[in-house]
Image (cartoon, rainbow, N blue to C red):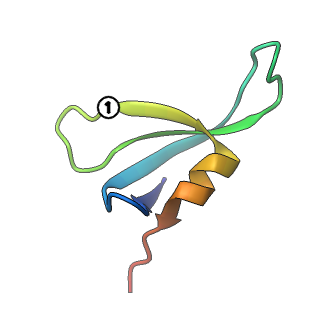
């Protein structure tokens, strides 16, 4: 799992898995399954991998 920061809001999210979209229209599309970080009952999301990487940046720990 990797931690990312939303470039616009600064909110933190944890990428849980790199997944494959299996719907007919987008079969094979790579997506990220991710959730809010640091919340007791975090919301979970799915977003196209390329769009995710445009809007989020990895959090680097020293």
Please provide percent x and percent y for residue 53: 61, 57
In this figure, what is the number of numbered marks?
A: 1
Task: Tell me which residue sits at (53%, 56%) in the image.
Answer: 55
Task: Tell me which residue sits at (72%, 26%) in the image.
Answer: 21
Residue at the limit of the structure toward the bottom, as seen here:
62
Q: Is residue 20 above or below residue 3?
A: above
Please tell me in which quadrant of the rendered image residue 9 appears.
bottom left
Q: Is residue 59 above or below residue 3?
A: below
Please provide percent x and percent y for residue 43: 32, 31
Q: Is residue 1 above or below residue 41?
A: below
Residue at the limit of the structure toward the top, as seen here:
24
User: SS at mark 1?
Assistant: loop
Query: How many residues crowd mark 1 within 10 Å: few (<14), some (14–19), many (20+)?
Result: few
Please provide percent x and percent y for residue 62: 38, 87
Which residue in the protein does label 1 denote?
43
Task: Tell me which residue sits at (56%, 41%) in the image.
Answer: 17
Please tell me in which quadrant of the rendered image residue 48 appears.
top right
Residue 43 appears left or right of 3: left
Q: Nearer the viewer, residue 62 or 6?
A: 6
Residue 14 appears left or right of 18: left
Please provide percent x and percent y for residue 54: 60, 58
Residue 19 appears left or right of 22: left
Task: Tell me which residue sits at (49%, 53%) in the image.
Answer: 1
Residue at the limit of the structure toward the front, as seen here:
8
């Amino acid at each position: 799992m990797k931690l990312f920061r939303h470039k616009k809001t600064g909110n933190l999210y944890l990428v849980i898995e790199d997944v494959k979209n299996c719907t007919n229209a987008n079969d094979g599309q790579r997506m990220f399954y991710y959730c809010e970080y640091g919340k007791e009952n975090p919301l979970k999301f799915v977003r196209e991998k390329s769009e995710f990487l445009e809007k989020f940046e990895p959090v680097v720990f020293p």
